[in-house]
Amino acid sequence: VSICIGVWNTSDLGYLSPTMAGGLFAMDREYFNELGQYDSGMDIWGGENLEISFRIWMCGGRLLIIPCSRVGHIFRKRRPYGSPGGQDTMAHNSLRLAHVWMDEYKEQYFALRPELRTRSYGNITDRVELRKRLNCKSFKWYLDNIYPEIICCLNSLPPAH
C-alpha cells in the first residue's frame, strides 16, 4: 500500500496530521517510552490511535504523514479475538481517552454517548500523572492549534449536560 495523503501545513518532512490510523506509525523507541507507550489499561482494540495522537501533540511532539510511505496492513474477514467478557472495548478505551485527554470537551463525547457516562473504565491515575509529568497542553490548545477545523463540528453537537 502506498500512502500519499496530503493533510495540511506541509513541513520539510511530511504533512502535519491531527491523528493517525491505529498502529500504523513509526516512532523512535526512546521517545515512545518517554511518551508513556500505549495505555496498558486499554483493552484489545479501539481508540489507541486517537489517544497516542492527542498525547503526541499535547505533550510537545508532532505527527507527520510522510508522503508515499509504504505500509502493509492485512484486514481479516472477522475479528480473530474476543473481547474480555464480551465488553465493548472501543467504548472502554474511548472513555479512558476522554477522561485523561479531553478535559471539559469530554462532555461533547457524552452528549453523543450518554449511556457511557456512568460506565467503568478502570483506574487512570497513572495516565493522569503521566500527562502532568510530561507537562502536556490542554485539549483546547489541541483544538485551537492542531485541529481547528473540527470546531465547526463540535459546535453543531447537542448541548452537553
Image (cartoon, rainbow, N blue to C red):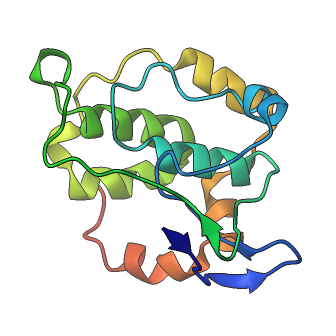
Residue at the far right in the pictured view: 12
Q: Is residue 85 above or below residue 14?
A: above
> Between residues 41 and 67, which one lies in front from this camera angle?
67
In the displayed structure image, the side of residue 43 where residue 123 appears, left or right: right
Picture coordinates of residue 31, whole percent (x, y): 81, 35
Q: Quadrant of residue 112?
A: bottom left
Q: Residue at x 71, y 69 (%)?
A: 66
> Between residues 74 and 143, which one lies in front from this camera angle?
74
In the displayed structure image, the side of residue 30 where residue 101 appears, left or right: left
Picture coordinates of residue 28, whole percent (x, y): 80, 39
In the displayed structure image, the side of residue 57 where residue 44 appears, left or right: left
Q: Residue at x 60, y 24 (%)?
A: 127
In the displayed structure image, the side of residue 127 where residue 136 appears, left or right: right
Q: Residue at x 13, y 15 (%)?
A: 85
> Between residues 33 and 57, which one lies in front from this camera angle?
33
- Total marks placed: 0
Picture coordinates of residue 159, whole percent (x, y): 29, 66
Q: Residue at x 49, y 50 (%)?
A: 50
Picture coordinates of residue 49, whole percent (x, y): 49, 48
Q: Is residue 125 above or below residue 142?
A: above
Q: Quadrant of residue 83?
A: top left
